[in-house]
Amino acid sequence: MKRVFTILAIAGLLFFSATPAVYAQDETTTNQVADSTKTDETVAPADVQTTDNATPAEEKTFHQVLKQKFIEGGPGFMGIVLLTLIFGLAIAIERIIYLNMASTNTRKLVQGVEDALKSGGVEEAKELCRNTKGPVASIFYQGLDRMDEGIDNVEKAVVGYGGVQMGLLEKNIAWLSLFIALAPMLGFLGTVIGMIGAFDAIEAAGDISPSLVAAGIKVALLTTVFGLIVAMILQIFYNYIISKIDSIVNNMEDASITLIDVLIRNKNK
């Protein structure tokens, strides 16, 4: 978990550090082009007629456009929205890795436990569960460990420890849902502040001019767009994680019932 947070944090810092440099470079390039244009107009005014044959401007890549829009949206709210994306992805990646490692072949495990009970008894079955990863194997071990206390106590141990394993599966999911709700709210807050800035500019100028209003409206729209995009990305990961948890929990419940049946059959023999 700490490694995932560290990697994503470094990526975010690199993104922030690269953004001002690109912005400054674009601004310098623009100024140089403007100066060269003025020089050409002063020295050779006859060349103005050759603008029709000028080469078209180089198209920007998607990454360059994304950086430009990020800068135009303002470093304040856009940076906070980016942090929600980074932390949300860190939690989502950590949960996906944990859930994939927690997935086991329950049918194979149940068959192995039943064979172990027939051949070597409870201790061999416990050793098999101890060497198998996943919540199902942990639940089986807790049930087998109370085999001497009776089937009722075994069932209580399986149910109780199943609740503990379910809590481990759902760990940090609340934080992920918080970031999903927080991202669009931050975007809407940036929208309100941008509109307030636009109206302040109109009030200060005493006149409605498109150039005065455009900056505030652009900030308002960009923060909203980025907030909604972050929320949609995290929502996809959230739904996948929830479906994965439901699948594991269903396997846990089905395997627990099967274990009780296996223990009852072996006890009656």
Image (spheres, rainbow, N blue to C red):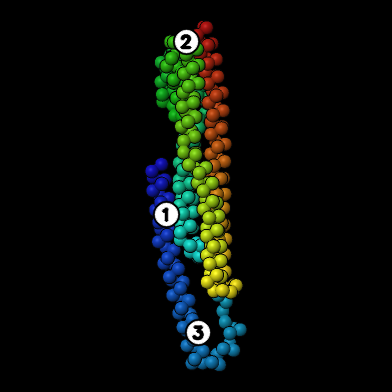
Q: Secondary structure at mark 3?
A: helix
Question: Decide: marks 1, 2 in contact (CB < 8 A)?
Answer: no
Mark 3 nearby-residue class (10 Å; few <14, some 14–19, many ≥20): few
At label 1, the amino acid type is Ala
Location of residue 219 in the rendering, given as x and y in whole percent from the top left corner: 53, 63
Q: Secondary structure at mark 2?
A: loop
Cα–Cα span, label 3 and label 2: 92 Å
Does 98 appear above or below 225?
above
Question: Decide: marks 3, 1 in contact (CB < 8 A)?
Answer: no
Mark drawn on residue 149: none
Q: Secondary structure at mark 1?
A: helix
Which comes before the other along the chain, label 3 or label 1? 1
Q: Quick check: can you spot residue 56?
A: yes
Read off the residue under disc 2. 150
Mark 2 nearby-residue class (10 Å; few <14, some 14–19, many ≥20): few
Residue drawn at 43 percent across, 14 percent down: 146
Read off the residue under disc 3. 37
Does 62 appear above or below 243?
below
Residue 80 vs residue 67, the one in the foreground: 80
| Side of 158 relative to 3 (left or right) | right
At label 2, the amino acid type is Gly
Location of residue 12 in the rendering, given as x and y in whole percent from the top left corner: 43, 55
Residue drawn at 56 percent across, 93 percent down: 46
Does 40 appear above or below 81?
below
Residue closest to the far top: 269
At label 3, the amino acid type is Thr
Read off the residue under disc 1. 11
Q: Quick check: can you spot residue 234?
A: no
